Every structure is written in C-alpha cells, then in structure tokens.
Amino acid sequence: MSTSVSRPKLGSMFYFVLAATLGTYFLFAAVQGDYGVFRQAQIAGEARTLEAERDKLVADLDQLRNLTRRLSDGYLDIDLLDEQVRDVLGYVRADEIVIR
C-alpha cells in the first residue's frame, strides 16, 4: 500500500499569483494613481484654493471698476479726485500742516 501526496498543480498556483498581482496593481492604481483617491483629494484642494484666489481677483476688479467709473468724465467724485491728487502729486493746501 502506497500513499500518494497530492500537491496543487503549478498552473493553478500561477493563476492565483497572477490574480493577486493584478489585484494589488489595480488597488494601488485606485488609491495612488493619476485618477486615484489621493489625486482626487489633491485636485479638490487645488480647486478650492483657485476658487478663493478667483474670488479675491473678482473683488479687486470690481473695486478698480468702481474707482475708474468714479474718475470718469460722466461721473466725477470730487473727494476721490482730491485724494488721488494728494496721493500722487503730493498736493497740500496752504492752510494744512503735514506731519511725516
């Protein structure tokens, strides 16, 4: 009487190793790949930063448009004009004292 030990065939082990390797690769790509979870979180953070910068630039543009309109020929704001003359040209009235 002889007992034979059955061992798994080499082909089935090869398929198991191949499936495990492919599964590991796809898991890695899903987490850290170009379109993975970490990249999506990074893109969302960059989008929030860029949106905040855009909102700041829009506010600056609105302020500049307002100042431009207030200094235009159709609408002249005397107080703003006086402020600009004092700031740019260093204009001072005779009855004022300048402290630096």
Image (cartoon, rainbow, N blue to C red):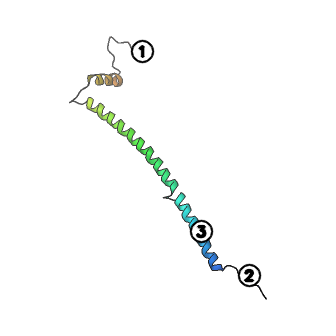
Judge whether 14 appears above or below 68 on screen.
Answer: below
Query: Going by the image, does 40 lie left or right of 69?
Result: right
The quarter holding residue 56 reads top left
Q: Secondary structure at mark 3?
A: helix
Q: Secondary structure at mark 2?
A: loop
Disc 3 to disc 1, C-alpha distance: 77 Å
Which amino acid is tagged 3? Thr
Task: Name the residue at 29% across, 32% down.
Answer: 66
Disc 1 to disc 2, C-alpha distance: 103 Å
Residue in the foreground of this view, choosing between 41 and 69: 41
Q: Secondary structure at mark 1?
A: loop
Check disc 2 and report the residue beneath it. Answer: 5
Check disc 3 and report the residue beneath it. Answer: 21
Judge whether 5 appears above or below 26 on screen.
Answer: below
Task: Name the residue at 26% across, 25% down.
Answer: 77
Check disc 1 and report the residue beneath it. Answer: 99
Mark whose residue sits in front, 3 or 1: 3
Q: Position of residue 2 (x, y in %)?
A: 78, 87
Q: Position of residue 28 (x, y in %)?
A: 56, 61
Which amino acid is tagged 1? Ile
* Upstream in sequence: badge 3 or badge 1: 3
> How crowded is the residue under tag 3: few (<14 C-alpha within 10 Å), some, or many (20+)?
few
Query: Going by the image, does 13 lie left or right of 3?
Result: left
Which amino acid is tagged 2? Val
Task: Name the residue at 42% across, 41% down.
Answer: 52
Residue farthest to the bottom? Answer: 1
Residue farthest to the front? Answer: 1
Q: Give yes or no for contact between labels 1 and 2 (Cβ–Cβ under 8 Å).
A: no
Q: Give yes or no for contact between labels 3 and 2 (Cβ–Cβ under 8 Å).
A: no
